[in-house]
Amino acid sequence: MKKILTFGFIGIFNLGIVSCSCSQNMFDSTKASSEKIMSTLNNTSWVLKRLDSQNRDFIPTEEQKELVLSFSDNTYGTSDGCNGQGGEFNVKDNEISFDKGMSTMRYCGDEMKHLIYSVPLGKIKSIKVKKDQLQLFDENNAVVATYIKKK
C-alpha cells in the first residue's frame, strides 16, 4: 500500500511540473495587457511563414533563407526580401501600430519579383501571439501575415 501511495504521489507531482512548464509556453495576447504584449515582443525575432493576404507561403531559397521581423525597445525592423524598413511600434488594447521610420530604397526589378514578400505593416491593426506564432491582422480582422518565433 505504501508503494502505491508513493508512486501515486510521484505521478501527480510529475504531472504538476509538466502542466506548469507547458502553461509558461502558452502566452496568448488576446488575454494579455498591452504592457505584457510589449514585454513579450521585446527582444524577439519572428520568421515569416505565410503571407495570408496573398495566400502565399514563404519559400526559402539560396538567395533568401528567411525574412525576419524583429522587435527591440519599442522599435521593429524587417525586410521584404529586397528592401528593409524599421521604426517604432506601439501596442494599446491589443491594437498595434507600426510607424515607419527608415527604409532602404534599393531598385528591385522584375528578376527579384518572386523574392518580394511585402507585408503592409502600415495597414496592420491588431496582433495575436500564441505560443510561438505571431499573426498580424488588418482593420477587417483578416490575417495578413503569419510568423513563427525564431529560435
Image: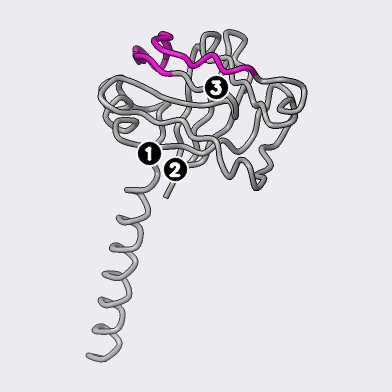
Given contact means CB atoms under 8 Å apart, are the residues at marks 2 and 1 in contact?
Answer: yes
Q: CA distance from mark 1 to mark 3?
A: 31 Å
Identity, as a three-letter code, of the amino acid under mark 3: Asn
- Label for residue 83? 3
Identity, as a three-letter code, of the amino acid under mark 2: Lys
Q: Which residues are magenta?
A: 86-107
Disc 2 packing (10 Å; few <14; some 14–19; many ≥20): some
Disc 3 packing (10 Å; few <14; some 14–19; many ≥20): some
> Looking at the picture, how far across and down is residue 108, in whole percent?
66, 20
Main secondary-structure element of the magenta-colored stretch: strand
Task: Find residue 142 and report its image quarter.
Answer: top right
- Label for residue 131? 2
Q: Is residue 78 left or right of residue 88?
A: right
Mark closer to the chain start, 2 or 1? 1
Q: Which residue is mark 1?
A: 27
Identify the residue shown where x is 45% and y is 32%. Answer: 129
> Looking at the picture, how far across and down is residue 55, in whole percent?
75, 28
Task: Find residue 40 and report its image quarter.
Answer: top left
